[in-house]
Image (cartoon, rainbow, N blue to C red):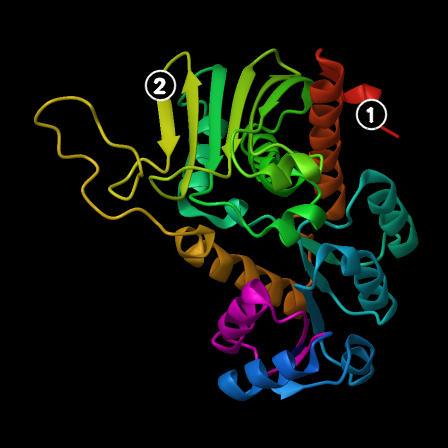
């Protein structure tokens, strides 16, 4: 199988390296708006290189992976679908709900598109989902999800990221929906800026907390920040009437215990999301290669990405209006 990949920035180059080692992948061809960067990555990883994404698609790959900047996602997804090949696209589908809806409409029902929410392929998140779905936890009353970055990205990234709810919180929103099988009915969001001024200048916040009420009246609390100096901290706790389970509670947890004579956690925290989810990214791309080879249903269709985007938009509305917002208020 020959895989085309558009966008070889940090995550794109990482994905290209994973793809070259997957069974069934014979070759990878890459393209980037920065031609010199594309050539450097291709030379380093022994890949083919195309002069543009359009040229890449004309070369006839068997599947198409999109890791370009968000603004390029919509047209690249459509181009891949029009080429009649399976498409993998890193989240989000588009910068906003309106464009996401337009992409879904333009692509139609026949296209195969997998959106990159890698937590669906993480062993811990999978175990939590299995425990909940088996009934072992009883009925769930509370979920607590965190995504805490150790340091903020550059100001240039924040200006085009879509904001903390869409860029960061959307992973937690998707994980909560995927694990519980429930929809988010209402959100109540708060945000703060105690760090760099460029967050406020971009209309963003550097820290947020949201209370989500799910459609079965269970509650989820989501916390995100760009300033978790202890390290990269991604966790999910699922608390039920019979039992509780936690994701991310291992020796690399960046949280010191205040209890005396307690040595947990004992190892160095993960420095970033790429190290934390390295195995999940491999499983995710392996699933896409298998989907491209064998067919079947996407493990993360665009409709799921749309639902997470609706939750993020409701959070932004709640923050602006200083009140709870029903997701139905922002649904098109």
Question: Which residue bears the numbered disc 2?
Answer: 243
Q: Is 214 on the left or on the right of 107, as rendered?
A: left
**Does the magenta segment cover residue 8?**
yes
* Closer-to-camera residue (330/319): 319
Q: Which quadrant of the rendered structure holds the C terminus?
A: top right
* Closer-to-camera residue (44/247): 44
**Does the magenta segment cover residue 318?**
no
Disc 2, SS: loop
Q: Is 208 on the left or on the right of 320, as rendered?
A: left
- Which comes before the other along the chain, label 2 or label 1? 2
In the image, what residue occupies the spot 85% across and 61% down?
75
Label 1: how many Cα within 10 Å (few below 14, some 14–19, many 20+): some
As drawn, 278 above or below 120: below
Is residue 1 shown to the viewer in this render? no
Q: Which quadrant of the rendered structure holds the N terminus?
A: bottom right
Query: Which x, y percent locates residue 320?
Result: 74, 20
Magenta residues (range): 4-32
Query: Which x, y percent locates residue 72?
Result: 78, 61
Q: Quadrant of residue 77?
A: bottom right
Query: Which x, y percent locates residue 303?
Result: 76, 42
Q: Which mark is residue 63?
A: none
Mark in front: 2 vs 1:
1
In the image, what residue occupies the spot 54% across and 72% down?
19
As drawn, 52 above or below 261: below
Label 2: how many Cα within 10 Å (few below 14, some 14–19, many 20+): some
In the image, what residue occupies the spot 71% across and 13% down?
322
* Closer-to-camera residue (41/248): 41
Question: Which residue bears the numbered disc 1?
Answer: 330
* Closer-to-camera residue (285/39): 39
As drawn, 323 above or below 195: above
């Amino acid at each position: 199988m020959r895989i085309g990949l558009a966008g070889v920035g940090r995550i794109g180059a990482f994905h290209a390296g994973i793809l070259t080692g997957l069974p069934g992948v014979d070759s990878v061809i890459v393209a980037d708006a920065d031609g010199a960067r594309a050539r450097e990555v291709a030379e380093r990883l022994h890949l083919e290189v195309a002069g543009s994404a359009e040229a890449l698609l004309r070369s006839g790959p068997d599947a198409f992976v999109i890791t370009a900047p968000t603004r390029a996602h919509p047209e690249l997804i459509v181009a891949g679908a029009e080429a009649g090949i399976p498409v993998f696209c890193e989240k989000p589908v588009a910068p906003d709900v309106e464009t996401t809806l337009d992409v879904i409409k333009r692509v139609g029902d026949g296209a195969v598109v997998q959106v990159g929410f890698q937590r669906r392929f993480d062993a811990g998140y999978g175990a939590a989902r299995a425990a909940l779905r088996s009934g072992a936890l009883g009925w769930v009353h509370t979920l607590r999800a965190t995504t805490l970055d150790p340091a903020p990205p550059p100001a240039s990234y924040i200006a085009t990221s879509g904001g903390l709810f869409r860029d960061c919180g959307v992973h937690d929103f998707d994980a909560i929906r995927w694990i519980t099988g429930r929809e988010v009915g209402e959100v109540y969001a708060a945000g703060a800026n105690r760090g760099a001024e460029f967050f406020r200048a971009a209309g963003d916040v550097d820290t947020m907390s949201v209370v989500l009420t799910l459609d079965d009246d269970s509650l989820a609390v989501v916390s995100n920040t760009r300033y978790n100096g202890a390290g990269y901290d991604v966790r999910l706790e699922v608390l039920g009437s019979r039992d509780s389970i936690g994701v991310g509670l291992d020796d690399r947890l960046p949280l010191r215990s205040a209890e005396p004579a307690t040595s947990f956690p004992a190892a160095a925290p993960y420095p970033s999301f790429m190290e934390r989810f390295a195995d999940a990214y491999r499983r995710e791309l392996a699933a896409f290669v298998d989907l491209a080879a064998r067919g079947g249903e996407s493990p993360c269709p665009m409709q799921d990405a749309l639902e997470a985007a609706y939750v993020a938009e409701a959070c932004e509305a709640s923050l602006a209006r200083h009140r709870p917002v029903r997701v139905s208020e922002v649904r098109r």
